[in-house]
């Protein structure tokens, strides 16, 4: 218990100077203990140079809560400062009163957490349950965070039984009668600080309680210790009191208290105008006869200190839920601390806006007899001002209060992935009907979620369908059940080992439940069976039609000219047809493209754009993970329903569910006709057309008429409205209303009139052809889409002479007209899954109507009509502008008099075409730049006169980005350039983008790195690792050639080719411990600008033997990085990864790469609190080697918006000085640098232009491996053409820096330091009477760029941020180990030593710093000594991460998530304590995502592990005794032996390595993803030797009883093993005795 005692003793905050705060991880932070290992070891931690003493961490005692809007403690109200110096207060939000919700409000509150509970199954109520829960809460401090003061927690609390004994004594002392368990209740109330408001709040609650026939027995002041509250939390600390109530019993009492609370909330909201703030500051935490919550904006360790009740021995409870919150926002908001009233939530609901909008639309139909007609008094049910957790709590609470069983409520709100589930099919198949029944009535609240819940009678927890949050549970011999986000929270893994009878985990979609009244404990199967059998769900579904897709027709529906006219009217461009529609029809997948999006934003373009183009897809970033549609598609579904949604509160069988189920929202023409013919739907088709005469108001009038027609149809009984622009629907001479506008307007109109849940919307759309278009239509309300014109295009394309000839010549497969339509539909389906997945959403029903987009260039008139609640911060087009843009499609396509229409016009949206759309990266620009820098090392220094021509080309270009619409108006007179800082100082702020070696050639990659090192800037390795020889200094001859780098020219002696920034992208390709130790900075790539929310992809033809060796993979095998980072599922996981990197290399700064989108400021605040040193903001237009075309064009927001929002939010929340802000990409000149500086950036990233400066000619074929100048190819003959030299890039950056100096001098400023964050110097360009800028289309007149041109306030000095030392995490277990003299000596002299220590869960990433010390001196495998580390206890997250050769770690106890992540060598063995009574093979010993990205070493687990075991394992060998889902996912090498049961989806994406699986119950075959791997028995001597040898090692290292049993009966067990073999291993001796001749010859 010594380790736990140390952690507890260190829980108090450490007072530090302002701006220098200390991070307490809950363990090992003595006041001023040295953090430096012995001198010789300290030297080994860094191979080049030294740094100043480490800066203490800011992560401290972690985190803060959140309040809507940007707020600073320096001002009482949110404010912005204009250039004139006036303070403009942000308007306060009115209380929510129902209807569609505002995404802006939702984005201001994001969180994640640690959670758990303790309960007695025997009904014992003890004070120890409270104290144990508080201890566990304290040991999860690192899963929460603190505000800028490092003391105000983001939130912590407990929920438990009402302490009847303690309060009974209080009532006796006070003379209060009638307070009796079962007949009384307690309300925990937060009251406003204002005395008058507090008084009024008490009066309101008293009135509402008494109105329900209850008696207020009295009010009790809750005793609190205010001294432990942090400064920021104290500013909003409420008055906390309890109301004691009597007058009813059991469920009747619960409902009366519920109604009283809801009425009190509504009354306070009605008073908000009269008494501002009362609605927000009067909050009832709980009011119940069973449970009570104690919570606040507190750190975990002080909850028990703050609430003195919790220290009272008479405070006894049977159970206690505890919760610690990590909010990405920063201003304390006490009500959002958890637990809530019914549940505690660790995770993020990704579908929140849709959930809230659908709840608002259906609540009018939600009734139940228990409410006796009072349902309107309970509305609105949800509130967008509350967090996702609070809103889920509100819905669940209502369902339970209405009589729905607790487990059933959680199952229908958070359903498991029940399709294609072998275990479910085998054990509880009846639950499938339950889920099908509710699928159309209640969309899933989807996202990573561990939910603990109770109504006071039942207690349980539920995990999301993907298993994206950790959840462990264990049971003791005295019938206590424990659940926690981590094991080890009580610090008794060894001392209490004999008492623990079982250990388990919650897998994806699983639930456990304890009955607090009977003591019965049920696991998932039993709970699900009980719920599914309550009603005859299978019978209810008999009347539902599950619609199978019809066979698409072969006949064309119009002639060739008619098709072209229709395409032109619908807005098609020639490249849309050839590159998108025809490509999808041919290949069944979206087209791939490269080099990002450098065309003007649609609102800036002089060419017409479809309405879809103005909307950008949102994506998961930090607060929640993307998911994987490629390898984990089994959890995803595109199923939709058509028809009315019934009464969720009181469903009555089949009449309450939609009548039709669809497998996909993509409909063939024939499917629509089937739907029209279904009597159950009474479908009505309504035309979507407007008078295209150019009259003002025509579009708005037509939309209003369309909405009225839809309302009439639904009111008349129609359950499906089909919005159509087909020629046979309405007047075909009238132009079509844009489908997206039509769908959104009808959707929101039906919500407004209370009819939305009574009908579905289907759209027949000419304009929908891209996956993005389908996502927009579904996202704004359509249940299904018929792309009738795209399908007709497919049919006519297949029937064309060109395609007929191609098929005859064998250039294309022989596909029928039906086939190409199916291919097109399949491509759309795949694309929709990808779009859902990048937001972390599994189900299309949850994406439906969720409006997960943001808008750039659409004004408030259009937003309010059709897209209400969508983020649109820069204004833009109105309805008349939209009508004019739609009319341009006609005028830009149709011929003049006497001309013939031969085809639709091109617009040049993807490629540079003369006379068409402008592209910022074009051939003219490239030539000018190449001349200025002397491409090929032709000039020792750049030609500034030639550069001026390049500068003019860039600065006089048509507006392509928002900053082109701004002009700088300095407030100073110009100065001499001699007074401005030097070129060298400016260059030190320059970085290059993360371009991986593999995506670009070795020549290009190394030339960029050498150039950046010469100028003192920083290059970025990108994903994929680096050759260790690049860490050494280069020796060059007089000709600039080197023996070690013979492929490069223009080298100098002393050059270094190492990238200063090494991108880890979590545990992905090429990340080894030595790679990490060679870094100046480590970049965590959370998202990539060109495809945020998606993974990397490297085509197999670019995986040369050299690239494969760096990535620990197989040559020629395509490499796909998983879209999610499997160790970043939430903000606290990102904090953990940052911690891990600081642990292994304490000298390297850690940066986090984000992509701009609305809400990034909130995310950036969380990242700063998570202890990052640098935050990099990228635009959504970034360059890339390969990406789906729709992702390049339609995901991610502008750099300018993201950068300004991040800077402003950090300033407002006192976090700006903690982090460096880096603007990534889009910079092409000194003017770009100046503009980014004004917006708040400290450093400036150059991406595509850096490639151009080395010779790139923008051929835009990077993804094909055919780059004509060898910049982006791995083909040796093309690489030989590489024209560049490091000096070229040096010249460019020096010329760019000189331009910066000239701009600064003209502005009157001496340094970038003086202008960073001065966006008040911007003014929007406006010249024309209509408000548009010179040379810009009229539609820009509605733009309002005040968001970019409004001061963000004082942010501190940039140079001080840059000079700041690497953030520190305090003293760690590894520091203690490294200070042991024997350890230091063994590392220094390559000797051997043994060190023994205790370990607890707050000891995170244990042994990594030891591994880093070894790797810094000897590399990953060069250490000839042996450091043996023996530990006892419960290891924290990332145990054994980064282990290297020569380090051996033994743990007796248990471990959490991420064991052996990025392991590079060495050994790790984990086994349970000897006193444990359970069979190890039946119990969990390690968490999720073990061996993620391991590149070597061995690991042995004497027990089971969780999900995603050995994901992306490259070379490690391991034995484990059972795993969860997704074992061996994305594995590229190594060997995995599993001696027990596994979950589903084994071997998904496995391209290398071999797996052995013991199958004792013949279920393994159903668990395997056979897309790549094959299954076979162990049939070779080499395979048997490999398997047996690893099991023997496993037994030797862990003493495994299971391993011993297998070896004892080897002949009996061997036939029960399956061997998984990917194609790359098929010819290895372990897999086959028959080796093909060509393989033998090459061996």
Image (cartoon, helix red, strand yellow):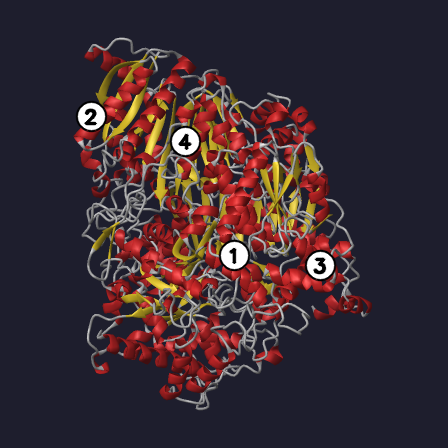
Identify the mark nearer the N-term, 3 or 4. 4
For the N terminus, the quadrant is top left
> Residue, x 37% and y 54% (percent of image)?
1143
SS under mark 1: helix
The mark closer to the camera, 2 or 1, is 1
Residue 379 percent across, percent down from the top left = 41, 29
Q: CA distance from mark 4 to mark 2?
A: 25 Å
Q: Nearer the viewer, residue 1578 or 1151?
A: 1151
Identify the mark nearer the N-term, 2 or 1. 2
Task: Please state if 409 lies on the left or on the right of 316 as rendered.
Answer: right
SS under mark 2: helix
The mark closer to the camera, 2 or 3, is 3
The residue singled out by tag 1 in the image is 611
SS under mark 3: helix
Q: Nearer the viewer, residue 892 or 810?
A: 892
Query: Mark number for residue 1542?
Result: none
Q: CA distance from mark 2 to mark 3?
A: 70 Å
Task: Please state if 1016 lies on the left or on the right of 776 as rendered.
Answer: left
The mark closer to the camera, 3 or 1, is 1
Q: Which quadrant would residue 1398 be assigned to in this image?
A: top left
Identify the mark nearer the N-term, 4 or 1. 4
The residue singled out by tag 4 in the image is 380
Identify the mark nearer the N-term, 3 or 1. 1
> Residue, x 69% and y 52% (percent of image)?
1583
Query: Mark number for residue 794?
Result: 3
């Amino acid at each position: 218990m010594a380790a736990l005692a140390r952690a507890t003793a260190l829980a108090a905050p450490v007072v530090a100077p302002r701006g220098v705060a200390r991070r307490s991880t809950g363990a090992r932070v003595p006041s001023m203990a040295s953090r430096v290992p012995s001198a010789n070891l300290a030297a080994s931690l860094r191979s080049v140079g030294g740094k100043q003493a480490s800066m203490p961490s800011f992560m401290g005692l972690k985190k803060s809560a959140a309040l809507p809007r940007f707020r600073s403690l320096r001002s009482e109200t949110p404010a912005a400062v204009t250039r004139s110096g006036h303070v403009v207060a942000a308007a306060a939000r009115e209380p929510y009163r129902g209807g569609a919700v505002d995404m802006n409000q939702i984005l201001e509150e994001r969180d994640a957490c640690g959670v758990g509970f303790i309960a007695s199954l025997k009904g014992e109520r003890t004070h120890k349950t409270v104290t144990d829960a508080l201890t566990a809460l304290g040991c999860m401090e690192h899963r929460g965070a603190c505000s800028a003061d490092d003391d105000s927690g983001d939130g912590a609390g407990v929920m438990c039984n009402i302490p009847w004994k303690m309060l009974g004594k209080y009532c006796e002392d006070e003379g209060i009668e009638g307070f009796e368990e079962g007949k009384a209740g307690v309300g925990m109330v937060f009251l406003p600080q204002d005395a008058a408001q507090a008084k009024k709040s008490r009066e309101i609650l008293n009135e509402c309680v008494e109105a329900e026939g209850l008696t207020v027995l009295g009010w009790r002041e809750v005793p609190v210790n205010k001294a432990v509250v942090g400064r920021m939390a104290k500013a909003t600390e409420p008055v906390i009191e309890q109301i004691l109530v009597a007058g009813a019993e059991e469920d009747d009492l619960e409902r009366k208290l519920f109604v009283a609370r809801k009425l009190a909330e509504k009354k306070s909201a009605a008073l908000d105008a009269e008494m501002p703030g009362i609605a927000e500051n009067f909050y009832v935490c709980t009011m119940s006869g069973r449970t009570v919550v104690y919570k606040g904006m507190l750190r975990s360790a002080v909850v028990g200190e703050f609430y003195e009740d919790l220290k009272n021995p008479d405070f006894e409870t049977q159970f206690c839920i505890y919760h610690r919150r990590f909010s990405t926002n920063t201003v304390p908001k006490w009500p959002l601390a958890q637990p809530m009233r019914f549940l505690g939530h660790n995770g993020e609901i990704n579908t929140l806006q849709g959930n809230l909008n659908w709840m608002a639309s259906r609540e009018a139909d939600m009734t139940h007899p228990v409410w006796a007609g009072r349902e309107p008094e309970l509305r609105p049910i949800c509130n967008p001002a509350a967090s996702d957790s609070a809103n889920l709590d509100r819905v669940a609470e209502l369902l339970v209060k209405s009589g729905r069983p607790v487990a059933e409520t959680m199952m229908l709100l958070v359903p498991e992935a029940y399709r294609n589930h072998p275990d479910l099919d085998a054990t509880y198949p009846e639950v499938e009907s339950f889920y099908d029944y509710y699928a159309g009535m209640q969309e899933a609240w989807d996202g990573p979620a561990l939910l603990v819940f109770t109504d006071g009678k039942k207690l349980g927890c539920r995990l999301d369908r993907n298993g994206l949050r950790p959840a462990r549970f264990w049971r003791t011999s005295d019938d206590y059940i424990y659940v926690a986000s981590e094991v080890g929270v009580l610090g008794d893994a060894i001392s209490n080992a004999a008492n623990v009878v079982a250990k388990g985990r919650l897998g994806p979609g699983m639930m456990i439940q304890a009955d607090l009244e009977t003591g019965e404990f049920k696991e998932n199967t039993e709970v699900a069976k009980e719920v599914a059998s309550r009603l005859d769900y299978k019978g209810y579904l008999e009347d539902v039609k599950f619609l199978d897709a019809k066979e698409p027709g072969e006949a064309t529906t119009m002639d060739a000219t008619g098709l072209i006219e229709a395409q032109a009217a619908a807005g098609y461009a020639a490249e849309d047809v050839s590159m998108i529609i025809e490509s999808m029809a041919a290949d069944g997948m979206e087209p791939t493209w490269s080099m990002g999006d450098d065309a003007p934003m649609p609102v800036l373009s002089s060419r017409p754009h479809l309405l879809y183009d103005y909307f950008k897809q949102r994506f998961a970033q930090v607060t929640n993970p993307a998911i994987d549609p490629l390898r984990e598609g089994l959890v995803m579904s595109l199923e939709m329903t058509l028809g009315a949604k019934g009464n969720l509160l009181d469903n009555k069988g089949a009449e309450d569910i939609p009548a039709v189920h669809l497998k996909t929202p993509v409909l063939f023409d024939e499917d629509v006709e089937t739907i029209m013919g279904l009597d159950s739907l009474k479908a009505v088709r309504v035309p979507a057309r407007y008078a295209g005469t150019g009259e003002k108001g025509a579009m708005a009038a037509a939309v209003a008429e369309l909405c009225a027609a839809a309302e009439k149809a639904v009111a008349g009984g129609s359950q499906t409205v089909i919005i159509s622009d087909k020629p046979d629907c309405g007047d075909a001479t009238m132009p079509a209303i844009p489908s997206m506008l039509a769908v959104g307007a009808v959707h929101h109109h039906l919500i407004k009139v209370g009819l939305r849940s009574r009908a579905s919307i289907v759209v027949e759309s000419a304009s929908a052809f891209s996956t993005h278009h389908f996502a927009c239509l579904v996202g704004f309300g359509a249940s299904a889409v018929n792309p009738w014109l795209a399908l007709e295009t497919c049919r006519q394309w297949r029937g064309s002479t060109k395609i007929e000839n191609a098929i005859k010549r064998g250039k294309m497969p022989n596909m029928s007209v039906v086939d190409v339509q199916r291919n097109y539909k399949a491509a759309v389906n795949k694309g929709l899954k990808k779009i859902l997945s990048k937001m972390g959403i599994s189900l299309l029903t949850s994406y439906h109507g969720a409006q997960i987009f943001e808008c750039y260039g659409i004004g408030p008139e259009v937003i309010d009509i059709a897209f209400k609640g969508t983020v649109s911060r820069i204004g833009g087009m109105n309805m008349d502008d939209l009508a004019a843009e739609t009319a341009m499609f006609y005028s830009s396509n149709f011929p003049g008099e006497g001309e013939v229409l031969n085809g639709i016009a091109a617009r040049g949206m993807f490629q540079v075409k003369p006379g068409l759309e402008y592209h910022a990266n074009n051939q003219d620009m490239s030539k000018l730049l190449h001349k200025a820098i002397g491409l090929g090392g032709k000039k020792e220094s750049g030609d500034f006169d030639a550069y001026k021509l390049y500068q003019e080309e860039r600065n006089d270009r048509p507006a392509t980005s928002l900053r082109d619409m701004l002009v700088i108006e300095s407030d100073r007179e110009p100065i001499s350039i001699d007074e401005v800082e030097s070129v060298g100082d400016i260059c030190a702020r320059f970085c290059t983008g993360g371009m991986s070696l593999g995506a670009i050639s070795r020549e290009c990659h190394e030339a960029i790195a050498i150039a950046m090192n010469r100028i003192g800037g920083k290059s970025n390795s990108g994903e994929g690792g680096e050759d260790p020889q690049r860490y050494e200094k280069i020796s060059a001859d007089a000709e600039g050639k080197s023996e070690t780098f013979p492929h490069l020219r223009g080298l100098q002696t002393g050059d270094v080719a190492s990238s200063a920034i090494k991108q880890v992208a979590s545990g992905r390709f090429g990340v080894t411990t030595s790679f990490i130790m060679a870094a100046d900075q480590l970049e965590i790539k959370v998202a990539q600008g060109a495809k945020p929310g998606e993974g990397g992809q490297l085509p197999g033809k670019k995986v040369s033997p050299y690239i494969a060796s760096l990535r620990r993979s197989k040559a020629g095998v395509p490499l796909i990085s998983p879209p999610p980072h499997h160790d970043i599922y939430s903000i606290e996981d990102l904090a953990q990864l940052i911690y891990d990197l600081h642990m292994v290399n304490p000298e390297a700064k850690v940066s986090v790469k984000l992509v701009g989108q609305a809400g990034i400021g909130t995310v950036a605040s969380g990242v700063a609190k998570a202890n990052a040193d640098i935050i990099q903001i990228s635009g959504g237009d970034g360059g890339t080697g390969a990406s789906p075309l729709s992702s390049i064009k339609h995901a991610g927001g502008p750099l300018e918006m993201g950068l300004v929002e991040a800077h402003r939010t950090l300033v407002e929340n006192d976090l700006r000085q903690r982090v460096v802000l880096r603007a990534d990409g889009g910079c092409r000149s000194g003017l770009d640098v100046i503009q980014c500086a004004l917006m708040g950036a400290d450093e400036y990233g150059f991406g595509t232009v850096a490639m151009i400066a080395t010779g790139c000619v923008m051929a835009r074929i990077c993804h094909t491996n055919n780059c004509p100048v060898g910049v982006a190819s791995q083909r040796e003959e093309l690489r030989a053409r590489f024209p560049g030299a490091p000096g070229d890039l040096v010249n460019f950056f020096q010329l760019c820096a000189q331009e910066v100096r000239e701009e600064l001098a003209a502005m009157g400023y001496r340094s970038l330091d003086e202008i960073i964050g001065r966006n008040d110097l911007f003014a929007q360009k406006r010249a024309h009477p209509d408000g548009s800028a010179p040379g810009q289309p009229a539609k820009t007149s509605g733009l309002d760029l005040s968001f970019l041109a409004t001061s963000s306030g004082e942010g501190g000095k940039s140079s001080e941020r840059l000079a700041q030392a690497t953030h520190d995490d305090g003293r760690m277990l590894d520091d203690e180990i490294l200070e042991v003299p024997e350890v230091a000596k063994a590392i220094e002299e390559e000797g051997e030593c043994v060190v023994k220590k205790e370990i607890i869960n707050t000891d995170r990433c244990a042994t990594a710093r030891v591994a880093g010390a070894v790797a810094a001196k000897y590399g990953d495998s060069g250490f000839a000594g042996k450091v043996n580390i023996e530990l006892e206890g419960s290891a924290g997250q990332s145990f054994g991460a980064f282990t290297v050769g020569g380090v051996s770690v033994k743990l007796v106890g248990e471990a959490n998530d991420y064991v052996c992540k990025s392991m590079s060598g060495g050994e790790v063995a984990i086994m349970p304590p000897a006193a444990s009574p359970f069979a190890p093979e039946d119990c969990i010993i390690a968490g999720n995502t073990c061996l993620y990205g391991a590149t070597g070493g061995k690991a042995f687990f004497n027990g089971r592990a969780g999900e995603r075991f050995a994901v992306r394992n490259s070379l490690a060998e391991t034995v484990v005794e059972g795993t969860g889902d997704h074992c061996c996912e994305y594995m590229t090498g190594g060997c995995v032996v599993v001696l027990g049961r596994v979950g589903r989806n084994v071997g998904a994406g496995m391209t290398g390595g071999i797996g052995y699986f013991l199958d004792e119950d013949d279920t393994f075959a159903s668990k395997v993803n056979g897309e790549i791997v094959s299954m076979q028995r162990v049939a070779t001597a080499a395979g048997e030797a490999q398997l047996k040898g690893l099991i023997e090692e496993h037994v030797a290292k862990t003493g495994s009883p299971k391993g011993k049993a297998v070896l004892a009966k080897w002949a009996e067990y061997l036939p029960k093993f399956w061997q998984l073999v990917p194609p790359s291993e098929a010819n290895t001796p372990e897999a086959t005795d028959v080796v093909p001749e060509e393989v033998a010859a090459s061996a």
